[in-house]
Image (cartoon, helix red, strand yellow):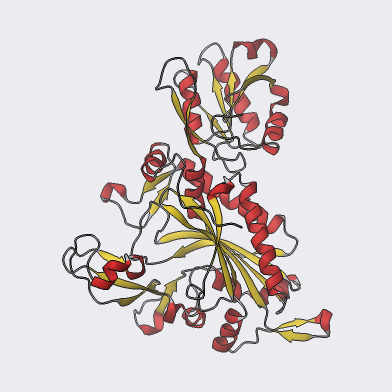
Amino acid sequence: MAEKSGEYKGKATMEKITSLAKRRGFVFQSSEIYGGQGGAWDYGPLGVALKNRIQAAWWKEMTQLQDDVVGLDAAILMHPRVWEASGHVENFTDPLVDCKKCNARFREDMIPPENIETRKCPECGGELTATRKFNLMFKTHIGAAEDSASVVYLRPETAQGIYVNYKNIIQSNRMKIPFGIAQAGKAFRNEIVTKNFIFRTCEFEQLEMQFFVKPGSDEKWFDEWRARRWAYYEKLGVLMDSLRWHRHGADELAHYAKDAYDIEYLFPMGWRELEGVHNRSDFDLKRHAEFSGKDMQYIDQDAGNERYIPYIIETSAGLTRALLMLLCDAYDEEKVADKGNEDDWRTVMRFHPNVAPITVAVLPLMKKDGLAELAENLRADLREDFSTDYDQSGAIGRRYRRQDEAGTPFCVTVDYQTKEDGTVTLRLRDSMEQTRVPTAGLAARLRDEIKAYKRAESGKV
């Protein structure tokens, strides 16, 4: 794939996204009434719904739609030797420097080269301290005594829980190589610098899959999983011109990696990693065999009981980072009419219906004359199959605008004609087109619209 420029042409800015996120209940600052907790965020009603639907879409893609991938939910607290074997105790560090004048703290690799050479602070010009290593793992204790024997770590990644369970899953589920194990779960990193809203935080959720293959077939499977993960974002309705591949150079490769690519997204702050696809070789299983004393070899009964340590192809994404990507990608500002009113604009979140926090909103035209009761009954019928909302407050146009900002793809209005012929007005978010639909066939119509959904360009249908 050809390299793409870094010029951002979207309508979202981080200021607009953070404002909308709080206003509409997507994301709040953690412990805000106490001044906030850096590196931590709370997900409001729309945010947790969006997050859960992104995770569900990923889980379906990686397990339900794959014959050779199964799921796992490993514990956050693991034996401390796991992190010695993985290299995290020794290698999971960032280069840290401080400014002696303004006390600002930086990752050295994020400071402009000219400031590194002069050892001057990029913020105030003060003198920088010498570089020191800073381990990113959160350390705590388990049990009553706080001594070296009680030390445990909050996991900085979910992958190691998969590796230490790989033999259990082979034996209990009769898995044969090639096969994968998928896991979604919390991870924790004591980041030196947390910024760009929820892009880099201390507490986050990962979506990881480890695919075990026979040595020698790893390059084929590496290419295969790159293709599968790229296609996934197309299914999510992401603007594909905002995605690109970045291959790690020799100086970027992690100590365990044979090859690595990142899918990068063009955020308002520039190209940033969205998901990594890595060929981890046999490093991880060999290390756990060494540190645990357990045999991690796979016995290939289909090849005369041949024994080998599998290679691992990893796909690794951040759930909350994917949420930020979709907020930025879906954000649009559109002039909705040309009647001499230059201020007649709407903000609309163009989420794919499969991940939108609300699928359909039911709106009675009026609260009176039995319309509210009809609308409430209709919502009760729909909520079994769809994520729904009900809104009867304010003019119908304002209610449409609120649902546009929430990213609701379908609005259903119950009006006086509904009482006469049993039809409702179905409004499509992207085009704002309105049609009459019988309530008896509404659920089927919504399913057809979701299945056929294709995101249009801004202002076009």
Expressed as whole percent of the image width and height from the top left, the position of residue 287 reads: 56, 84
Expressed as whole percent of the image width and height from the top left, the position of residue 378 reads: 63, 25
Q: Please tell me whether residue 393 is drawn above or below residue 73 in the rendered image.
A: above
Q: Please tell me whether residue 56 is drawn above or below residue 363 in the rendered image.
A: below
Residue at (65, 87) in percent of width and height: 295
Expressed as whole percent of the image width and height from the top left, the position of residue 266 reads: 48, 51
**Of residues 331 and 460, the one drawn nearer to the viewer in this rendering:** 460
Specify whether 274 is left or right of 69: left
Residue at (57, 14) in percent of width and height: 370
**Of residues 117 and 231, the one drawn nearer to the viewer in this rendering:** 117
**Of residues 107 and 52, the one drawn nearer to the viewer in this rendering:** 107
Q: Quarter of the image containing the N terminus?
A: bottom right
Residue at (46, 79) in percent of width and height: 80
Specify whether 78 is left or right of 223: left
Q: Please tell me whether residue 394 is drawn above or below residue 261 in the rendered image.
A: above
Q: Quarter of the image containing the C terminus?
A: top right
Q: Please tell me whether residue 87 is drawn above or below residue 108 in the rendered image.
A: below
